[in-house]
Image (spheres, rainbow, N blue to C red):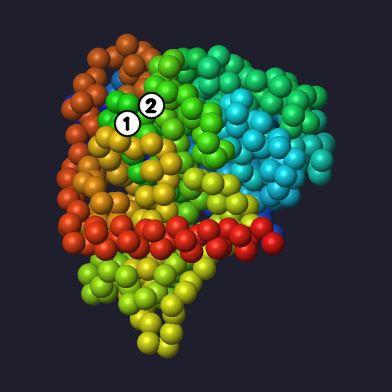
Amino acid sequence: MYVGIDVGTSMVKAAAFDAMGRQLAVESRPVGLKLHGGLVEQDMEEVYGEVVAVLEALTSAVAEPVELAGLTGQGDGVWLVDGEGRPVRPAASWMDGRAHELVDRWLADGTFETVFRRTGGAMFPGSPGPLLAWLDRHEPKALDAAKAALYCKDMVFQRLTGAGSTTDVSDASMPFLDPRTRTYDNRVVELLGLAHRRGLLAPVSDPVATAGTRGEGLPPGTRIANGPYDLPACALGAGVTSPGDGLLIVGTCLASLVATTELDLTGEPAGLYISTDRPGHWLRAMPAMVGTAALDWVLSTTGVRHDEVDGLLAGTPPGANGVRVLPYFAPSGERAPFVEPRLRAELTGVSLESSRGDLVRATCEGIGYAARHCLAAAGLTGSLAVCGGGTRSSAWMRLLADVLGRPLRVVEGEVGARGAVLAAAERYGVPLDAEVWTQPTAVVEPDPERAAFYTRGYEEHLDRLAGARARARK
Protein backbone atom coordinates (compact mmCIF):
# COMPACT_ATOMS: atom_id res chain seq x y z
CA MET A 1 0.00 0.00 0.00
CA TYR A 2 0.92 3.66 -0.41
CA VAL A 3 0.54 5.96 2.59
CA GLY A 4 -0.22 9.66 2.48
CA ILE A 5 0.17 11.73 5.66
CA ASP A 6 -1.62 15.08 5.95
CA VAL A 7 -0.83 17.12 9.07
CA GLY A 8 -3.66 19.64 9.05
CA THR A 9 -4.43 22.58 11.28
CA SER A 10 -7.13 20.87 13.34
CA MET A 11 -6.83 17.26 12.18
CA VAL A 12 -3.98 14.84 11.47
CA LYS A 13 -4.77 12.16 8.90
CA ALA A 14 -3.10 9.18 7.29
CA ALA A 15 -4.62 7.42 4.29
CA ALA A 16 -3.75 4.13 2.58
CA PHE A 17 -4.13 3.69 -1.19
CA ASP A 18 -3.66 0.76 -3.53
CA ALA A 19 -1.67 0.98 -6.77
CA MET A 20 -4.77 2.22 -8.68
CA GLY A 21 -5.37 5.08 -6.24
CA ARG A 22 -8.32 3.48 -4.47
CA GLN A 23 -8.53 4.68 -0.88
CA LEU A 24 -8.28 1.64 1.38
CA ALA A 25 -8.50 3.23 4.82
CA VAL A 26 -8.15 6.52 6.66
CA GLU A 27 -7.17 7.22 10.25
CA SER A 28 -7.49 10.67 11.82
CA ARG A 29 -6.94 12.39 15.15
CA PRO A 30 -7.83 15.96 16.18
CA VAL A 31 -5.13 18.35 17.35
CA GLY A 32 -5.66 21.41 19.50
CA LEU A 33 -5.37 25.11 18.75
CA LYS A 34 -4.74 27.56 21.57
CA LEU A 35 -6.30 30.96 20.85
CA HIS A 36 -5.69 33.90 23.15
CA GLY A 37 -5.39 37.61 22.46
CA GLY A 38 -4.84 37.21 18.73
CA LEU A 39 -2.23 34.48 19.23
CA VAL A 40 -2.89 31.04 17.73
CA GLU A 41 -0.44 28.33 18.77
CA GLN A 42 -0.06 24.55 18.62
CA ASP A 43 1.75 22.01 20.77
CA MET A 44 4.34 20.35 18.52
CA GLU A 45 4.64 17.27 20.71
CA GLU A 46 0.88 16.77 20.51
CA VAL A 47 0.96 17.15 16.73
CA TYR A 48 3.82 14.70 16.29
CA GLY A 49 2.30 12.25 18.75
CA GLU A 50 -0.93 12.19 16.77
CA VAL A 51 0.99 11.63 13.53
CA VAL A 52 2.58 8.54 15.05
CA ALA A 53 -0.80 7.43 16.42
CA VAL A 54 -2.62 7.62 13.07
CA LEU A 55 0.20 5.80 11.32
CA GLU A 56 0.17 3.02 13.88
CA ALA A 57 -3.60 2.70 13.56
CA LEU A 58 -3.44 2.70 9.76
CA THR A 59 -0.71 0.08 9.46
CA SER A 60 -2.61 -2.11 11.94
CA ALA A 61 -5.87 -1.75 9.99
CA VAL A 62 -4.35 -2.53 6.57
CA ALA A 63 -2.15 -5.60 6.71
CA GLU A 64 -0.08 -4.85 3.63
CA PRO A 65 3.55 -3.73 3.30
CA VAL A 66 4.13 -0.01 2.88
CA GLU A 67 5.68 0.64 -0.53
CA LEU A 68 6.34 4.31 0.19
CA ALA A 69 4.91 7.27 2.08
CA GLY A 70 4.33 10.89 1.16
CA LEU A 71 4.10 13.70 3.70
CA THR A 72 2.19 16.96 3.47
CA GLY A 73 0.76 19.43 5.97
CA GLN A 74 -0.32 22.96 6.76
CA GLY A 75 1.88 25.76 5.49
CA ASP A 76 3.13 29.07 6.90
CA GLY A 77 3.45 29.75 10.62
CA VAL A 78 6.74 29.24 12.48
CA TRP A 79 7.77 25.92 14.03
CA LEU A 80 10.98 26.58 15.98
CA VAL A 81 12.99 23.42 16.65
CA ASP A 82 16.36 22.37 18.04
CA GLY A 83 18.84 20.18 16.19
CA GLU A 84 16.75 17.06 16.81
CA GLY A 85 13.55 18.62 15.51
CA ARG A 86 12.10 19.09 18.99
CA PRO A 87 10.19 22.22 19.95
CA VAL A 88 11.87 25.30 21.39
CA ARG A 89 8.46 26.91 22.01
CA PRO A 90 4.88 26.24 20.82
CA ALA A 91 4.36 26.55 17.09
CA ALA A 92 2.89 29.86 15.91
CA SER A 93 0.07 28.97 13.50
CA TRP A 94 -0.64 30.47 10.09
CA MET A 95 -3.84 31.75 11.76
CA ASP A 96 -1.83 33.81 14.28
CA GLY A 97 -2.44 37.55 14.32
CA ARG A 98 0.26 38.87 16.66
CA ALA A 99 2.34 40.42 13.88
CA HIS A 100 -0.45 42.53 12.36
CA GLU A 101 1.18 45.81 13.45
CA LEU A 102 4.37 44.86 11.62
CA VAL A 103 2.38 44.06 8.49
CA ASP A 104 0.56 47.39 8.85
CA ARG A 105 3.91 49.19 9.08
CA TRP A 106 5.30 47.35 6.05
CA LEU A 107 2.15 48.12 4.09
CA ALA A 108 2.60 51.80 4.89
CA ASP A 109 6.34 52.12 4.22
CA GLY A 110 6.47 50.08 1.00
CA THR A 111 8.29 47.02 2.38
CA PHE A 112 5.25 44.85 1.79
CA GLU A 113 5.03 45.73 -1.90
CA THR A 114 8.79 45.48 -2.41
CA VAL A 115 8.80 41.94 -1.04
CA PHE A 116 5.90 40.96 -3.28
CA ARG A 117 7.60 42.36 -6.39
CA ARG A 118 10.69 40.27 -5.60
CA THR A 119 9.10 36.98 -4.51
CA GLY A 120 5.45 36.99 -5.56
CA GLY A 121 4.42 36.49 -1.94
CA ALA A 122 2.09 38.92 -0.16
CA MET A 123 2.86 38.72 3.54
CA PHE A 124 0.15 38.39 6.15
CA PRO A 125 0.47 38.21 9.96
CA GLY A 126 0.67 34.41 10.07
CA SER A 127 3.39 34.07 7.44
CA PRO A 128 6.97 33.30 8.51
CA GLY A 129 8.46 36.72 7.74
CA PRO A 130 6.27 38.78 10.06
CA LEU A 131 6.19 36.07 12.73
CA LEU A 132 9.97 35.72 12.82
CA ALA A 133 10.36 39.49 12.94
CA TRP A 134 7.87 39.66 15.83
CA LEU A 135 9.66 36.89 17.73
CA ASP A 136 13.00 38.59 17.14
CA ARG A 137 11.63 41.69 18.86
CA HIS A 138 9.65 40.05 21.66
CA GLU A 139 11.11 36.56 22.21
CA PRO A 140 14.73 36.72 21.01
CA LYS A 141 15.81 33.97 23.42
CA ALA A 142 13.50 31.51 21.64
CA LEU A 143 15.21 32.28 18.33
CA ASP A 144 18.61 32.07 20.01
CA ALA A 145 17.77 28.56 21.24
CA ALA A 146 16.44 27.34 17.89
CA LYS A 147 18.38 25.50 15.24
CA ALA A 148 15.79 26.08 12.52
CA ALA A 149 12.49 27.82 11.83
CA LEU A 150 10.58 25.11 10.04
CA TYR A 151 7.11 24.47 8.69
CA CYS A 152 4.81 21.85 10.17
CA LYS A 153 5.59 18.93 7.86
CA ASP A 154 9.33 19.63 8.07
CA MET A 155 9.25 19.08 11.83
CA VAL A 156 7.36 15.82 11.32
CA PHE A 157 9.76 14.65 8.60
CA GLN A 158 12.78 15.33 10.79
CA ARG A 159 11.26 13.46 13.72
CA LEU A 160 10.12 10.48 11.63
CA THR A 161 13.45 10.07 9.84
CA GLY A 162 16.21 11.65 11.93
CA ALA A 163 17.26 13.63 8.85
CA GLY A 164 18.50 17.18 9.20
CA SER A 165 16.30 20.25 8.95
CA THR A 166 15.04 20.85 5.44
CA THR A 167 12.09 22.27 3.54
CA ASP A 168 10.96 22.21 -0.09
CA VAL A 169 10.38 24.88 -2.70
CA SER A 170 6.62 24.93 -2.11
CA ASP A 171 6.85 25.79 1.59
CA ALA A 172 9.79 28.12 1.05
CA SER A 173 7.62 30.09 -1.40
CA MET A 174 6.41 32.35 1.42
CA PRO A 175 7.92 34.92 1.68
CA PHE A 176 11.66 34.39 1.23
CA LEU A 177 12.02 32.33 -1.96
CA ASP A 178 12.81 33.93 -5.31
CA PRO A 179 10.47 31.97 -7.63
CA ARG A 180 12.80 32.47 -10.58
CA THR A 181 16.00 31.14 -9.01
CA ARG A 182 14.26 28.80 -6.50
CA THR A 183 16.67 30.01 -3.80
CA TYR A 184 16.23 32.37 -0.85
CA ASP A 185 16.28 36.08 -1.64
CA ASN A 186 18.71 37.47 0.92
CA ARG A 187 17.60 41.02 0.17
CA VAL A 188 14.11 40.14 1.41
CA VAL A 189 15.63 38.72 4.58
CA GLU A 190 17.42 42.03 5.08
CA LEU A 191 14.31 44.11 4.37
CA LEU A 192 12.47 42.31 7.18
CA GLY A 193 15.31 42.94 9.61
CA LEU A 194 16.22 39.27 9.82
CA ALA A 195 19.72 39.14 8.31
CA HIS A 196 21.15 38.11 11.69
CA ARG A 197 18.60 35.23 11.76
CA ARG A 198 19.35 34.00 8.24
CA GLY A 199 20.76 30.77 9.63
CA LEU A 200 17.33 29.73 10.91
CA LEU A 201 16.02 29.27 7.35
CA ALA A 202 16.29 25.58 6.55
CA PRO A 203 18.07 24.46 3.38
CA VAL A 204 15.72 24.19 0.41
CA SER A 205 15.42 20.67 -1.00
CA ASP A 206 14.77 20.85 -4.73
CA PRO A 207 13.43 18.28 -5.49
CA VAL A 208 11.84 17.31 -2.19
CA ALA A 209 13.91 15.49 0.40
CA THR A 210 13.66 11.73 0.86
CA ALA A 211 14.76 9.45 3.68
CA GLY A 212 13.99 6.21 5.46
CA THR A 213 11.87 6.23 8.59
CA ARG A 214 13.24 5.35 12.03
CA GLY A 215 10.35 3.08 13.02
CA GLU A 216 7.88 5.41 14.75
CA GLY A 217 4.45 4.90 13.19
CA LEU A 218 5.84 3.30 10.04
CA PRO A 219 8.13 0.27 9.69
CA PRO A 220 11.84 1.12 9.91
CA GLY A 221 13.34 2.05 6.57
CA THR A 222 10.04 3.00 4.91
CA ARG A 223 10.74 5.35 2.01
CA ILE A 224 9.18 8.76 2.63
CA ALA A 225 9.25 12.10 0.82
CA ASN A 226 8.86 15.50 2.49
CA GLY A 227 6.44 17.61 0.55
CA PRO A 228 4.91 19.53 -1.04
CA TYR A 229 2.76 21.31 1.56
CA ASP A 230 -1.00 20.91 1.63
CA LEU A 231 -2.09 23.42 -1.03
CA PRO A 232 0.11 22.14 -3.89
CA ALA A 233 -0.36 18.57 -2.63
CA CYS A 234 -4.12 18.99 -3.06
CA ALA A 235 -3.56 20.37 -6.56
CA LEU A 236 -1.60 17.23 -7.44
CA GLY A 237 -4.22 15.01 -5.81
CA ALA A 238 -6.99 16.72 -7.80
CA GLY A 239 -5.12 16.56 -11.11
CA VAL A 240 -4.68 20.34 -11.43
CA THR A 241 -1.43 20.67 -13.38
CA SER A 242 -2.37 22.22 -16.76
CA PRO A 243 -2.05 26.03 -17.08
CA GLY A 244 -5.39 27.77 -16.48
CA ASP A 245 -6.98 24.92 -14.53
CA GLY A 246 -7.90 25.64 -10.94
CA LEU A 247 -8.66 24.12 -7.58
CA LEU A 248 -10.85 25.40 -4.77
CA ILE A 249 -10.15 23.86 -1.37
CA VAL A 250 -13.14 24.33 0.89
CA GLY A 251 -11.47 23.74 4.23
CA THR A 252 -10.50 25.73 7.32
CA CYS A 253 -8.73 27.97 4.82
CA LEU A 254 -10.54 28.73 1.56
CA ALA A 255 -7.71 28.24 -0.91
CA SER A 256 -7.95 29.06 -4.61
CA LEU A 257 -5.14 27.77 -6.84
CA VAL A 258 -4.58 28.14 -10.57
CA ALA A 259 -1.77 26.40 -12.47
CA THR A 260 0.36 28.74 -14.54
CA THR A 261 3.62 29.00 -16.47
CA GLU A 262 3.62 32.81 -16.29
CA LEU A 263 5.11 34.78 -13.43
CA ASP A 264 3.39 38.16 -13.15
CA LEU A 265 4.57 40.24 -10.21
CA THR A 266 2.53 43.32 -11.17
CA GLY A 267 -0.95 44.21 -9.98
CA GLU A 268 -2.27 44.38 -6.41
CA PRO A 269 0.08 42.47 -4.09
CA ALA A 270 -1.91 39.50 -2.81
CA GLY A 271 -1.61 35.75 -2.46
CA LEU A 272 1.56 34.06 -3.60
CA TYR A 273 3.20 32.07 -6.34
CA ILE A 274 3.84 28.55 -5.10
CA SER A 275 6.87 26.94 -6.70
CA THR A 276 6.14 23.37 -7.79
CA ASP A 277 8.43 20.42 -8.39
CA ARG A 278 8.61 21.46 -12.07
CA PRO A 279 10.77 24.55 -12.68
CA GLY A 280 8.83 27.12 -14.71
CA HIS A 281 5.50 25.88 -13.34
CA TRP A 282 3.79 27.64 -10.46
CA LEU A 283 0.46 27.71 -8.70
CA ARG A 284 -1.01 31.20 -8.45
CA ALA A 285 -2.50 30.90 -5.00
CA MET A 286 -5.08 32.97 -3.20
CA PRO A 287 -5.35 31.23 0.19
CA ALA A 288 -8.03 33.24 1.97
CA MET A 289 -8.41 33.15 5.73
CA VAL A 290 -12.16 32.71 5.27
CA GLY A 291 -13.35 29.10 5.01
CA THR A 292 -15.25 26.41 6.88
CA ALA A 293 -14.14 28.01 10.15
CA ALA A 294 -16.53 30.88 9.36
CA LEU A 295 -19.44 28.51 8.83
CA ASP A 296 -18.50 26.53 11.95
CA TRP A 297 -18.68 29.73 14.02
CA VAL A 298 -22.13 30.55 12.67
CA LEU A 299 -23.34 26.98 13.26
CA SER A 300 -22.03 27.01 16.82
CA THR A 301 -23.50 30.43 17.54
CA THR A 302 -26.93 29.54 16.14
CA GLY A 303 -26.99 26.01 17.57
CA VAL A 304 -27.22 24.37 14.14
CA ARG A 305 -25.75 20.89 13.74
CA HIS A 306 -23.65 20.04 10.70
CA ASP A 307 -26.17 17.41 9.62
CA GLU A 308 -28.83 20.13 9.44
CA VAL A 309 -26.98 22.33 6.93
CA ASP A 310 -28.22 20.67 3.73
CA GLY A 311 -31.84 20.91 4.83
CA LEU A 312 -31.52 24.57 5.80
CA LEU A 313 -29.83 25.44 2.50
CA ALA A 314 -32.55 23.63 0.56
CA GLY A 315 -35.29 25.41 2.49
CA THR A 316 -33.94 28.95 2.13
CA PRO A 317 -34.07 30.86 -1.18
CA PRO A 318 -31.06 32.36 -2.97
CA GLY A 319 -30.28 35.70 -1.38
CA ALA A 320 -31.17 34.40 2.10
CA ASN A 321 -34.20 36.71 2.41
CA GLY A 322 -31.97 39.78 2.36
CA VAL A 323 -29.39 38.62 4.92
CA ARG A 324 -25.80 39.25 3.79
CA VAL A 325 -22.54 38.10 5.34
CA LEU A 326 -19.02 39.34 4.72
CA PRO A 327 -17.38 36.19 6.16
CA TYR A 328 -14.03 37.61 7.32
CA PHE A 329 -14.03 36.13 10.82
CA ALA A 330 -10.28 35.45 11.24
CA PRO A 331 -8.52 37.40 14.04
CA SER A 332 -5.72 38.24 11.60
CA GLY A 333 -8.07 39.72 8.99
CA GLU A 334 -7.77 38.66 5.36
CA ARG A 335 -4.79 37.80 3.18
CA ALA A 336 -6.27 37.02 -0.27
CA PRO A 337 -7.10 38.29 -2.82
CA PHE A 338 -6.02 41.35 -0.82
CA VAL A 339 -4.29 41.90 2.51
CA GLU A 340 -6.36 43.66 5.17
CA PRO A 341 -5.19 42.69 8.68
CA ARG A 342 -7.96 44.64 10.46
CA LEU A 343 -10.89 43.48 8.32
CA ARG A 344 -13.66 41.78 10.30
CA ALA A 345 -16.91 40.00 9.44
CA GLU A 346 -20.12 41.94 8.91
CA LEU A 347 -23.75 40.73 8.97
CA THR A 348 -26.40 42.97 7.40
CA GLY A 349 -30.07 42.68 6.63
CA VAL A 350 -30.77 40.75 9.84
CA SER A 351 -34.10 41.29 11.61
CA LEU A 352 -36.35 39.51 14.08
CA GLU A 353 -37.85 37.72 11.09
CA SER A 354 -34.49 36.26 10.01
CA SER A 355 -34.15 32.50 10.49
CA ARG A 356 -31.25 30.20 11.23
CA GLY A 357 -31.50 29.10 7.61
CA ASP A 358 -31.06 32.69 6.44
CA LEU A 359 -27.89 33.07 8.49
CA VAL A 360 -26.46 29.75 7.32
CA ARG A 361 -27.27 30.33 3.67
CA ALA A 362 -25.97 33.91 3.75
CA THR A 363 -22.70 32.66 5.24
CA CYS A 364 -22.33 29.99 2.55
CA GLU A 365 -23.11 32.55 -0.14
CA GLY A 366 -20.57 34.97 1.35
CA ILE A 367 -17.89 32.28 1.32
CA GLY A 368 -18.83 31.52 -2.29
CA TYR A 369 -18.45 35.18 -3.27
CA ALA A 370 -15.05 35.26 -1.56
CA ALA A 371 -14.05 32.17 -3.55
CA ARG A 372 -15.18 33.79 -6.81
CA HIS A 373 -13.11 36.88 -5.97
CA CYS A 374 -10.02 34.75 -5.28
CA LEU A 375 -10.37 32.59 -8.40
CA ALA A 376 -10.77 35.66 -10.61
CA ALA A 377 -7.65 37.21 -9.09
CA ALA A 378 -5.72 33.96 -9.55
CA GLY A 379 -6.52 33.90 -13.28
CA LEU A 380 -8.83 30.89 -13.65
CA THR A 381 -9.55 30.16 -17.33
CA GLY A 382 -9.89 26.36 -17.45
CA SER A 383 -11.70 23.68 -15.50
CA LEU A 384 -12.29 23.93 -11.75
CA ALA A 385 -11.87 21.11 -9.25
CA VAL A 386 -13.08 21.37 -5.66
CA CYS A 387 -12.08 19.39 -2.60
CA GLY A 388 -12.02 19.68 1.18
CA GLY A 389 -14.40 19.12 4.03
CA GLY A 390 -17.06 21.35 2.48
CA THR A 391 -17.62 18.81 -0.31
CA ARG A 392 -19.47 16.60 2.17
CA SER A 393 -22.45 18.95 1.83
CA SER A 394 -24.12 18.30 -1.53
CA ALA A 395 -26.38 21.34 -1.08
CA TRP A 396 -23.35 23.59 -0.50
CA MET A 397 -21.67 22.21 -3.63
CA ARG A 398 -24.77 23.06 -5.68
CA LEU A 399 -24.79 26.53 -4.12
CA LEU A 400 -21.08 26.99 -4.92
CA ALA A 401 -21.56 25.93 -8.54
CA ASP A 402 -24.34 28.53 -8.82
CA VAL A 403 -22.36 31.31 -7.11
CA LEU A 404 -19.23 30.58 -9.18
CA GLY A 405 -21.26 30.11 -12.36
CA ARG A 406 -19.27 27.12 -13.57
CA PRO A 407 -19.16 23.30 -13.29
CA LEU A 408 -17.34 21.83 -10.30
CA ARG A 409 -15.21 18.69 -10.56
CA VAL A 410 -15.73 17.34 -7.05
CA VAL A 411 -12.78 15.29 -5.80
CA GLU A 412 -13.60 13.57 -2.51
CA GLY A 413 -11.49 11.67 -0.03
CA GLU A 414 -8.05 12.56 1.26
CA VAL A 415 -6.92 14.67 -1.68
CA GLY A 416 -3.86 16.16 0.04
CA ALA A 417 -2.64 12.74 1.15
CA ARG A 418 -3.24 11.46 -2.38
CA GLY A 419 -1.13 14.28 -3.80
CA ALA A 420 1.62 13.59 -1.27
CA VAL A 421 1.79 9.98 -2.48
CA LEU A 422 1.93 11.07 -6.14
CA ALA A 423 4.76 13.49 -5.31
CA ALA A 424 6.65 10.76 -3.46
CA ALA A 425 6.12 8.31 -6.34
CA GLU A 426 7.51 10.85 -8.80
CA ARG A 427 10.51 11.43 -6.56
CA TYR A 428 11.24 7.71 -6.18
CA GLY A 429 10.49 6.81 -9.80
CA VAL A 430 7.48 4.65 -8.92
CA PRO A 431 5.11 4.45 -11.93
CA LEU A 432 1.66 5.47 -10.68
CA ASP A 433 -1.00 6.59 -13.19
CA ALA A 434 -1.80 10.15 -12.05
CA GLU A 435 -4.82 10.43 -14.37
CA VAL A 436 -6.43 7.37 -12.80
CA TRP A 437 -5.54 8.53 -9.28
CA THR A 438 -7.17 11.94 -9.75
CA GLN A 439 -10.56 11.11 -11.33
CA PRO A 440 -13.41 13.28 -9.94
CA THR A 441 -16.17 11.60 -7.98
CA ALA A 442 -18.86 13.90 -9.40
CA VAL A 443 -19.41 16.95 -11.61
CA VAL A 444 -21.88 19.57 -10.33
CA GLU A 445 -23.39 21.84 -12.99
CA PRO A 446 -24.69 25.34 -12.15
CA ASP A 447 -28.34 26.30 -12.63
CA PRO A 448 -28.40 29.12 -15.24
CA GLU A 449 -31.13 31.16 -13.52
CA ARG A 450 -29.50 31.00 -10.09
CA ALA A 451 -26.06 31.65 -11.61
CA ALA A 452 -27.38 34.88 -13.17
CA PHE A 453 -28.85 35.90 -9.80
CA TYR A 454 -25.52 35.32 -8.07
CA THR A 455 -23.59 37.23 -10.72
CA ARG A 456 -25.55 40.31 -9.65
CA GLY A 457 -25.07 39.36 -6.01
CA TYR A 458 -21.31 39.10 -6.53
CA GLU A 459 -21.11 42.69 -7.75
CA GLU A 460 -23.04 43.79 -4.65
CA HIS A 461 -20.64 41.75 -2.51
CA LEU A 462 -17.67 43.61 -3.99
CA ASP A 463 -19.32 46.95 -3.21
CA ARG A 464 -19.97 45.96 0.42
CA LEU A 465 -16.43 44.65 0.72
CA ALA A 466 -14.96 47.92 -0.52
CA GLY A 467 -16.83 49.77 2.21
CA ALA A 468 -15.72 47.29 4.86
CA ARG A 469 -12.08 47.60 3.80
CA ALA A 470 -12.29 51.39 4.02
CA ARG A 471 -13.73 51.15 7.55
CA ALA A 472 -11.02 48.68 8.57
CA ARG A 473 -8.33 51.23 7.75
CA LYS A 474 -9.74 54.01 9.92
Image quarter (top left, top right, bottom left or bottom right) of the C terminus: bottom right
Where residue 359 appears, as percent x and y from the top left, is 39, 73
Residue 51 - label: none
Where residue 464 appears, as percent x and y from the top left, is 48, 64
Secondary structure state at the residue bearing disc 2: strand
- Name the amino acid, label 1: Gly
Residue pointed to by mark 1: 244
Image quarter (top left, top right, bottom left or bottom right) of the N terminus: top left
Secondary structure state at the residue bearing disc 1: loop
Within-10-Å neighbours for mark 2: few <14, some 14–19, many 20+: many
**Between residues 369 and 237, which one lies in front from this camera angle?**
369
**Between residues 186 and 128, which one lies in front from this camera angle?**
186
State the CA–CA distance, disc 1 to disc 2. 6 Å
Give left or right: position of 128 versus 305.
right
Furthest residue toward bottom:
352
Dot 1 and dot 2 residues touching (CB under 8 Å): yes
Give left or right: position of 346 versus 351.
right
User: Which residue is pictured at 63% across the width and 19% down the height?
Assistant: 184
User: Which residue is pictured at 22% across the width and 29% down the height?
Assistant: 437
Q: Quadrant of residue 27?
A: top left
Q: Quadrant of residue 386?
A: top left
Residue pointed to by mark 2: 260
Which callout, 1 or 2, points at the residue further toward the start of the chain? 1
- Residue 234 seen from this side: no
Task: Work out whether 94 lies above or below 418.
Answer: below
- Name the amino acid, label 2: Thr
Where residue 268 appears, as percent x and y from the top left, is 55, 40
